[in-house]
Image: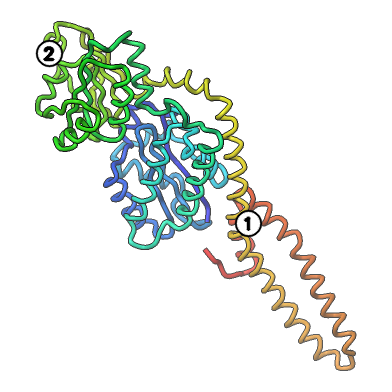
């Protein structure tokens, strides 16, 4: 089978595009069920985070879907015209797809290099994919993702690239420090009670803000988070008043539409007597409508705006990144060699058996014609036939193993099966 990935990330697409392609877990499961109904021979996993949406595919050679089919499926499922996001897409095949996944899961392709959240998100994507389809699938992609998890663990252990402040939440706090010189007189409001929100608040508490408020649509979750970190839980229905009360607003919910809109929050500057208000939106889709940034004394930033802080962060970790990249390259070669042997092995065996059957039939035919042939001569003829088969197989075998090592062995194996009329094992 061949392996593909198509998607976009924070480097190729702005948040205005990424939020249109974002999938919740339920949306991922529904999309994968529909995809499986349409392309039952293919395997698929959707990885959707605040910084990327990617679809990983494995399918038999000369089978559907094509990459173009997959892009069209994403456009159809999210109800987005192709022209709005296709220029932001990248695609990788076979070895490059494997390399890309290993780098993604190891957080080498993250906005914050070394952050551990992507590993949990990739594991969740695999879990959702398995749960969406009743059969034990995706088998090929399961093996690939499991290997990616092992590579990420090896990198984090050997290079310690995940040490220090390596999360979007920590970068958000560093960004806030560029706006405010001190926080002991500031009120911080967190909208959302998920893992990223909790981690962000833990970093923010290091700045010793005067007051920390937490609100969430589900009040119980806000109360649980507030109790764990020593903050105050407040009703979500009071959101307008809470934003007016805060000096720093951090938002990270799973809402599909902005929860802070100009229509509802347009009077916030007047309510605050035009004191500066910093708003950092870490959600995709965005929680804060972009028009909010136009209000007087309001400084609103989204996740893409955090990129300027992460650039310095990445520069400081270059030696660890280089070590990590070497581990990735070694792991890619190991995986391709392992998978290549699985791809081309059955084809080589099938061809060997087919040539063996042909030589045996031809030898039996020859024996009937050579009644005076001695046993020694028959043995020599058999040896000659075996040598011919071995020499015929030598170059195809070397070629198949070489192509298997770069992830394309199945293409050549399938071509050989077609040429020699061998049974396919896809």
Residue 294 visible from this viewpoint: no
Q: Residue at x 58, y 45 (%)?
A: 332
Q: Quadrant of residue 84?
A: top left
Q: Nearer the viewer, mark 1 or mark 2?
A: 2
Q: Secondary structure at mark 2?
A: loop
Q: Which residue is identified by label 1?
A: 412
Q: Residue at x 19, y 37 (%)?
A: 221
Q: Nearer the viewer, residue 34 or 260?
A: 260
Q: Position of residue 344 (x, y in %)?
A: 62, 60
Q: Secondary structure at mark 1?
A: helix
* Left or right of 411 in this view: 203: left
**Distance between mark 1 and mark 2 Cα atoms:** 66 Å
Q: How is the image coloured?
A: rainbow
Question: Residue 312 placed where, x, y %?
Answer: 48, 18
Residues under numbered marks 1 and 2 in contact, where contact means CB atoms less than 8 Å apart: no
Q: Which residue is mark 2?
A: 267
Q: Is residue 241 left or right of residue 84?
A: left
Indicate left or right for 266 with 113 as reference.
left
Q: Quadrant of residue 83?
A: top left
Q: Which mark is residue 32?
A: none
Q: Quadrant of residue 193?
A: top left
Say which of 194 and 415 sits in front. Answer: 194
Q: Nearer the viewer, residue 173 or 212?
A: 212
Indicate whether 318 appears above or below 361: above
Q: Crowding near pointer 2: few (<14 within 10 Å), some, many (20+)? A: few
Is residue 392 visible in the rendered structure shown here?
A: yes
**Residue plotted at (52% across, 63% down):** 426
Q: Residues within 10 Å of mark 1 (few under 14, many from 20)?
A: many
Q: Who is closer to the viewer here, 186 or 79? A: 186
Q: Position of residue 182 (x, y in %)?
A: 30, 10
Q: Give the mark nearer the N terminus: 1 vs 2.
A: 2
Name the spot of residue 126 as percent of width and height, x first: 39, 49
């Amino acid at each position: 089978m061949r392996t593909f990935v198509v998607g976009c990330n924070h480097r190729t697409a702005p948040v205005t595009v990424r939020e249109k392609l974002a999938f919740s877990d339920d949306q991922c499961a529904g999309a994968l069920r529909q995809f499986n109904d349409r392309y039952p021979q293919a395997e698929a996993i959707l990885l959707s985070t605040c910084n990327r949406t990617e679809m990983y595919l494995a399918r038999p050679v000369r089978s559907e879907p094509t990459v173009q089919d997959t892009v069209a499926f994403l456009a159809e499922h999210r109800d987005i015209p192709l022209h709005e996001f296709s220029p932001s897409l990248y695609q990788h095949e076979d070895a490059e797809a494997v390399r890309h996944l290993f780098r993604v899961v190891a957080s080498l392709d993250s906005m914050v290099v070394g952050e551990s959240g992507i590993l949990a998100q990739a594991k969740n994507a695999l879990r959702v994919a398995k749960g969406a389809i009743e059969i034990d699938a995706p088998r090929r992609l399961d093996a690939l993702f499991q290997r990616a998890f092992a590579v990420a663990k090896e990198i984090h252990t050997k290079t310690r690239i995940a040490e220090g402040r390596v999360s979007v939440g920590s970068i958000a706090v560093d960004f806030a420090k560029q706006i405010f010189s001190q926080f002991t007189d500031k009120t911080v409001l967190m909208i959302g009670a998920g893992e990223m929100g909790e981690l962000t608040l833990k970093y923010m508490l290091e700045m010793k803000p005067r007051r920390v408020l937490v609100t969430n649509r589900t009040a119980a979750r806000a109360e649980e988070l507030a109790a764990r970190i020593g903050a105050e839980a407040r009703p979500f229905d009071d959101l307008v008043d809470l934003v007016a009360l805060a000096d720093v607003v951090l938002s990270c919910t799973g809402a599909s539409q902005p929860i802070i809109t100009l229509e509802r929050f347009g009077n916030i500057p007047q309510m605050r007597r035009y004191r500066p208000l910093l708003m950092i939106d870490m959600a995709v889709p965005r929680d804060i409508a972009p028009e909010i940034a136009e209000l007087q004394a309001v400084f609103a930033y989204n996740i893409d705006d955090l990129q300027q802080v992460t650039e310095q962060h990445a520069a400081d970790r270059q030696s660890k990144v280089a070590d990590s990249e070497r581990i990735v390259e070694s792991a890619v070669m190991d995986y391709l060699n392992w998978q290549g042997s699985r791809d081309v092995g059955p084809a080589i065996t099938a061809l060997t058996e087919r040539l063996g059957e042909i030589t045996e039939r031809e030898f039996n035919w020859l024996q009937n014609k050579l009644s005076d042939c001695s046993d020694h001569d028959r043995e020599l003829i058999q040896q000659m036939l075996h040598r011919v088969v071995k020499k015929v197989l030598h170059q195809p075998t070397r070629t198949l193993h070489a192509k298997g090592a770069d992830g394309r062995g199945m293409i050549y194996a399938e071509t050989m099966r077609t040429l020699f009329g061998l049974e396919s094992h896809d």
